[in-house]
Amino acid sequence: MAVQFLDLSIIVAYILVILAVGFYVGKNEKLDDFLVNRRKTKLLLLVTSLVSSTAGAGFIFGAASGAYQSGMSFGITLTLAYVPGLILVGYFAPKINKFGRKYNAHTIGDFFAIRYSNRVRLIVALMTIIAFFIYVAMQFVAIASLIKIITGLDFTIGLFASALATIAYVAVSGIKSDFYTDFVQFWLMIVFLFILLIPIGFINLGGVDSLKALPPSYFDPFAFGGIEFFIGGLILGIPILLVSMDMWQKIYAAESEKTAKRVFQLGALIIIPFAILPTVIGMMGAVAVPNSDPNSIVFILMTNFLPVGLLGLGLAGILAVVMSTIDSMLMVGTATLTKDFYKTFINKTADETKMLKIARIFTVLFGLLGLLTAFLYSDILQLGLVGTFILVVLLPPLIGAFFWKRANSAAAFWSTLVGFVVLLIFLPSMPKTAFIPSILSGVIIFVALCYTTKTRLRINRQ
């Protein structure tokens, strides 16, 4: 079905509303508004922002893509990792929120710098930058796929047009407007997932009965990446959110320690259907439209089965899924570059006005870097996996910082560096399980150096 004028009008209207909200809220803001919303964000805004940014393109379209290719395995692993993962972050959230207020922290690098050293801050910031520009690339790929379906434009044209518009919006608005636009986008995502996708699955695709046509492998919980990926995904997927800086930014921005904890408890419950429904839809799509592009399966189903008007609303919902994640990803890159690199190593005397200006410049540069990655590599699912694998190398020093008095700067630095190098070595031959040798080597180095290097406890871990 071709996209009609009414559908395009709905999409354009949605984009204009989001831009208007973002630019209005972002007027006359200071650096603390831009980075952590002055640490006064209410529970409702935080919950809608957490769910809408976490359940982004990599989450929803990755679950659908994985289900289309191999069945329920990836979606099950995703759900079993994210739900307890969010609860785990909620456990640490009050401590992180208290730390942020005490030390005026804006990044996860601030924590590593105060607990260990600026050398550790530097390598942690580097890992964060690499991982999150890969995540940004993943969102841009999703937008470009959508634009191609809507307009028939070549992938490259769609990619550049969508990326530049999004980068410009985030550069002006910062995290303060991120919370408000995410609130709008959350409700549109609800419409997209539950009002539009459910009818597609249960009316046009034959419902659950259609799944009987799939081979038995589609119901194997270990089909995606084998049992190693499943077990490793649970062991490492649960704590991985702890080293994801977008989580830290939301915790820093919370109005209180109690709010910081509650947002993740609620988010853990709300996010469950955001993983299950795309998985079921992807499996139904494997029956209805075989031999299609897995990365575009949700778009293909919508254009094939939604009528005029509803299709525009559905496509706007997809834009909400992607945009709500892009702004958070760009803010992670911006805060890291501004605080952990520029303020710490380049211009230690920079005032707020100068840093805000630099932050907006870094938003543009970081977004363009993610755009370049999307242009070179366009597999949504694999991009998401690589970004996550990079963050895994930060787990040993982070957990050590919270729980082990012997944890020290040398152990944190070398375990991160060695873990990252091992990951790069094994990625070509083990694209779905390279995190296993990476994390094992990191843990071994961390423990060994904690016992052989003199401990220097920099802060009281309360």
Image (cartoon, rainbow, N blue to C red):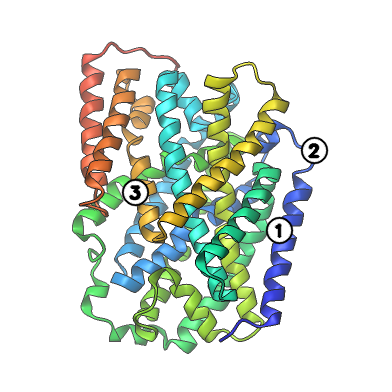
Q: Marks 2/1: CA distance?
A: 18 Å
- Whether tag 2 and tag 3 are in contact, CB under 8 A, the answer is no
The structure residue drawn at horizontal position 67% and vertical position 59%, both measured from the top left corner, is 184
Q: Quadrant of residue 20?
A: bottom right
Q: Is residue 99 above or below residue 14?
A: above
The quarter holding residue 411 reads: top left
Give how far across and how far down residue 61 sits, in percent.
Answer: 45, 65
CA gap between label 2 and label 3 equals 39 Å
Residue receiving disc 3: 237
Identify the residue at horizontal 57%, vertical 35% (top origin).
Answer: 335
Label 3 is placed on what type of residue?
Gly
**Closer to the camera in the image, 95 or 225:** 225
The three-letter amino acid code for the residue at tag 1 is Ile
Question: Residue 156, percent across and down?
Answer: 52, 63
The kind of secondary structure element at disc 2 is loop
Describe residue 103's horizontal placement relative to residue 412 as left or right: right
Q: Nearer the viewer, mark 1 or mark 3?
A: 1
Q: How far is disc 1 from disc 3 in space, using C-alphas?
A: 32 Å
- Kindly identify which numbered label has been placed on residue 47: none
Please tell me which residue lies in front, 160 or 118: 160
Evaluate whether residue 36 shows in this view. Answer: no
Compare marks 2 and 3 and give the one earlier in the sequence.
2
| SS label for mark 1 | helix
Q: Amino acid at mark 2?
A: Asn
Between circles 2 and 3, the one closer to the viewer is 2
**Badge 1 is on which residue?**
18
**x and y, in percent, of residue 114 in the image:** 47, 19
State which tag comes first along the sequence, 2 or 1: 1
